[in-house]
Image: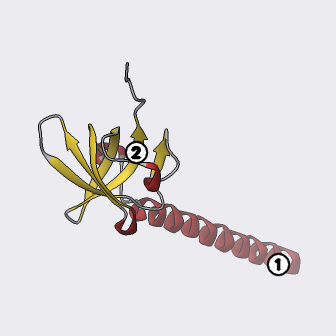
Amino acid sequence: MGTIRQGKGQVAILMTLVGCLLLFCAFFVSFETSSLAVSVDETLLIQGVVRRVLPGENMIFVKVTRGEKIKIRVYRQTGFVGTVSLKELERGQWVKVWYSVVGGENRAVKVEKLPDLGC
């Protein structure tokens, strides 16, 4: 009889630990997804010419083909293609910028420097 009670007690402890582990995993996953500022559905894409680069403020201004100039902030998480950092971008270069609008600010997700097609 004593061994049956011990077995039930061990099963109860094991079930409690498994439940705690599942709750912890669920909390961690929900925290990770809620802390991401960008989802695929919210990402916008522009293509245009770099008009101004402000490395000290982590900002670039891109003039799109419609003529408007868009101010975009670059973050540590921003991915770069064709260049390593914001400091390597120059006025007059063509770029594609994927960004999201967070709190009224355009935040760069990815910046791709397009190749120069000079003759």
The image shows residue 24 at horizontal and vertical percentages of: 57, 70
Instruction: Choose between 60 and 6: the one closer to the eye.
Output: 60
Instruction: Choose between 94 and 19: the one closer to the eye.
Output: 94
Residue at image position (20%, 51%) is 70
User: In the picture provided, is 73 more to the left or to the right than 113?
Assistant: left
Residue under label 1, please give it: 6
User: In the picture provided, is 17 more to the left or to the right than 35?
Assistant: right
Instruction: Determine whether 26 is above or below 100 in the image.
Output: below
Task: Say what amino acid the circle numbered 2 marks.
Answer: Val
The image shows residue 118 at horizontal and vertical percentages of: 37, 23
Indicate the quadrant containing the N terminus: top left, top right, bottom left or bottom right: bottom right
Residue at image position (41%, 46%) is 110
Residue at image position (36%, 49%) is 39
Task: Say what amino acid the circle numbered 1 marks.
Answer: Gln
User: How crowded is the residue under tag 1: few (<14 C-alpha within 10 Å), some, or many (20+)?
Assistant: few
The image shows residue 50 at horizontal and vertical percentages of: 29, 45
Instruction: Choose between 40 and 65: the one closer to the eye.
Output: 65
The image shows residue 68 at horizontal and vertical percentages of: 12, 45
Q: Which mark is residue 111?
A: 2
Residue found at the very far bottom of the displayed protein: 2
